[in-house]
Image (spheres, coloured by chain):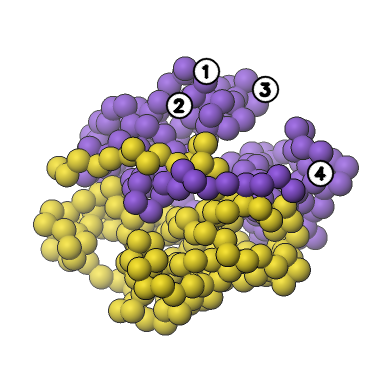
Chain colours: A purple, B yellow
Amino acid sequence: MRLTEQREGEIALPFDPGADLSESVCFIGRVKSPWQTRAECPKNMAAARETGQTAAVEIDAPYRQGLIGLQGVSHIILLSWFDRSQRNLIVQKPRHATEPKGVFALRSPVRPNPIGLHVSVVTALDVEAGRIEIDAIDLLDGTPIIDVKPYFASIDAFPGAVRSST
Amino acid sequence: MRLTEQREGEIALPFDPGADLSESVCFIGRVKSPWQTRAECPKNMAAARETGQTAAVEIDAPYRQGLIGLQGVSHIILLSWFDRSQRNLIVQKPRHATEPKGVFALRSPVRPNPIGLHVSVVTALDVEAGRIEIDAIDLLDGTPIIDVKPYFASIDAFPGAVRSST
């Protein structure tokens, strides 16, 4: 069930971005996390790390062979599917922000395609059991996972990336 | 039209990961790139940068307000949708590899959810025209884009990430 909410200054699309069924996603597994409610779930990966709580990804049986060769990879990119987030708010006002911002300038779970991106450290891997232990996650327990990718510093790490406040 | 191919040592799923239409993706725009054929398209972002060729993302009209506030962000994460890639190869043998590997240990466009992840430098932004100029891209001209996210070094940059060859 997707939750619906709209704050002052926010702008909603006049249609449902999830209504066109021509291209679909499949769930390859689920997150196992300590977070049962939105109130306790860390708002980003930095906050998740600060809790010191670990987590895991459980890959469904048909997809487990896809983990072969992931041994030796220190960091992974997880793509999650925010199945409880509305998809139509194109301009949003985060609680901490003074001005509304476009969804593509935010990492909000509310987006046309409700996909989350999380870089985690792999602490253990069991290919046969389909289990990846990770250092931290900012996702509710049971959130669907739609992709796992190896993180490559050569193309993914830009420590000098900046955002000037506007 | 999705292309189908299977090399020796590769393993296909016994079902189509795109067949369950309960969760769908929408296209928010398209890539404008110099690459018209697979043969000329760079295989990764490092190779794309080496060409010196720039590119752009064109966001469709309904989604353009989502770019508000992206000014001042130096790097973005683009999520693309490989609409011409098959989705069922769970173990793959890249041309350069000696051993087959699981899809989740590869950045191959062939995956259960055919989503590509690309970190690009923003060189110009026109919110009203829905146009983001970027330094490079490893995508065919016209490939659909499904998300744009601001890149935050604090949670996305791990320059020390490694992969030991197995």
Find residue A51 and name its label: 1
Mark found first going from the N terminus, 4 or 2: 4
* Residue extending furthest toward the right: A8
Which mark is nearer the camera, 3 or 2? Answer: 2
* Residue extending furthest toward the top: A52
- Give the image location of residue A92, x and y in percent: 76, 46
Callout 3: helix, strand or loop?
Answer: loop
Callout 4: helix, strand or loop?
Answer: loop
Report the residue marked by disc 4: A99
Mark found first going from the N terminus, 1 or 3: 3
Mark found first going from the N terminus, 3 or 4: 3
Report the residue marked by disc 2: A136
Callout 2: helix, strand or loop?
Answer: loop
Measuring 77% from the left and 33% from the top, which residue is drawn there? A95
Mark 4 Cα-neighbour bin, 10 Å: few <14, some 14–19, many ≥20: few
Which mark is nearer the camera, 1 or 3? Answer: 1
Can you tell which quarter of the image residue A37 is in?
top right
Mark found first going from the N terminus, 1 or 4: 1
Q: Are marks 4 and 2 on the same chain?
A: yes
Q: Which chain hosts label 2?
A: A
Q: CA distance from mark 1 to mark 2?
A: 8 Å
The answer to whether one can see residue B24 in this image is no
Looking at the picture, which amino acid does disc 3 mark?
Ala
Mark found first going from the N terminus, 3 or 2: 3
Mark found first going from the N terminus, 1 or 2: 1
